[in-house]
Image (spheres, rainbow, N blue to C red):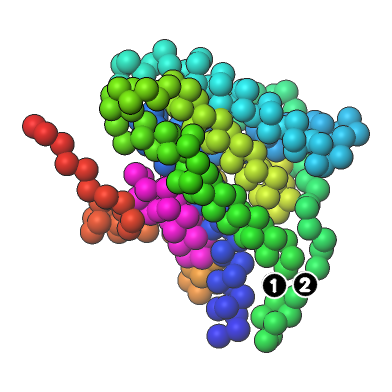
Amino acid sequence: MTDFVQLFFSGLSTGAIYALAALGFTLLWQASGTINFAQGEFVMLPAFMMLGFIHVGAPLAVAFAATVVLSVIVLGWLFKRGIVDPLFRYGMMPIVVATIGLAIALRNGVRAGYSAEAYPFPSLFADRLFNIGGVTITLQDVGTFVLAMLLVVATQAFLSRTVTGRAMQAVAQNTESASVLGINVPRMIFYTFAINAMLAASAALLVTPTYLAKFDMGEGLGTKAFFAAIIGGFNNSRGALLGGLIVGVGENLAAAYISPSYKDAVALVLFMVVILFKPQGLLGKKIERKV
């Protein structure tokens, strides 16, 4: 029982990272109908941005702040203007293909321009262990989970309790009606891309100390976050949180009680089960379309 509880709490930490990336998937989909298959690379790139600032002597806090600004410009504004906007008129499939190509380009660009080796990354938290009732929990796991949850809750609060957030939700529900009501639709959509970029940079800050900075670190992360978003409900941002936590905990339990080789298959298996029995996701809503 002690081992189970320890694995469960460790899985929550990993799941919280998946939830951050999955939240970006759901926000972009709701606001602009965009599926970004470079989402994992949007976490990888800020990690190397921060490393670059740290290597020139910047403290971690300064490196993170500068990376957030750069991420909003490159992964928010430039991504929207350079890829999404030109292809949006042609439907979703060209954007899907373009983001897959972008993911490959970012991975290979970092490998060629930086290195193919894995680099250590400074942690926000001290290397400490807590023993509670025989359950050993690291400060890294606790801190990662708490900060990730705070970011998710803060994003939810912003969307539901601020004028700008409610305007963004109105755009997500019906673009034409939002425009009629006087909402600046393009600006609200850009805000969504900016929030996604900030969440990606935050995920990089939390996940890289554990998994190290490597050019392909985002490949598995992006895939699992995508599955987590669908498991929770692609049209429900709260579902991203639930899906991420389920995948993170499921991976840990499968690795311990079945085999470590099955760990990476957990997200796919859960995805297939949910698609078969509840296609809209655990917290998703059915969407009716007129024929």
Q: Is residue 240 highlighted in magenta?
A: yes
Q: Is residue 92 left or right of residue 56?
A: left
The residue drawn where x is 34% and y is 44% is: 235
Residue plotted at (51% across, 65% down)? 249
Mark identifier at residue 189: none
Q: Residue 106's spot in the image, x, y percent?
A: 60, 26
Q: Nearer the viewer, residue 222 or 159?
A: 159
> Does residue 171 appear left or right of residue 66 in this picture?
left
Separation (CA) of disc 1 from disc 2: 6 Å
The vertical placement of 198 against 4, above or below, is above
| The quarter of the displayed image where residue 166 is located | top left
| Residue 199 place in picture, x, y as percent | 59, 41
Query: Is residue 59 visible to us here?
Result: yes
Element type where label 1 sits in the image: strand
In the picture as drawn, the residue positioned furthest to the right comes out as 57
Question: Which of the two labelled residues, at mark 1 and mark 2, occupies the earlier sequence position?
Answer: 2
- The percent position of residue 184, horizontal first and vertical second, equals 43, 22
What segment is highlighted magenta in the picture? 223-251
Residue named by callout 1? 137
Q: Residues within 10 Å of mark 2 (few under 14, many from 20)?
A: some
Q: Which residue is mark 2?
A: 129
> Which residue appears at 62% of the width and 60% of the height?
145
Residue 287 vs residue 271, the one in the foreground: 287
Secondary structure, magenta segment, majority class: helix
| Image-quadrant location for residue 3 | bottom right
Identify the amino acid type marked 2: Leu
Closest to the observer, 213 or 35: 35
Quadrant assignment for the C terminus: top left
Q: Quadrant of residue 61?
A: top right
237, above or below 127, in the image: above
Q: Are marks 1 and 2 in contact (CB under 8 Å)?
A: yes
Amino acid at dot 1:
Ile
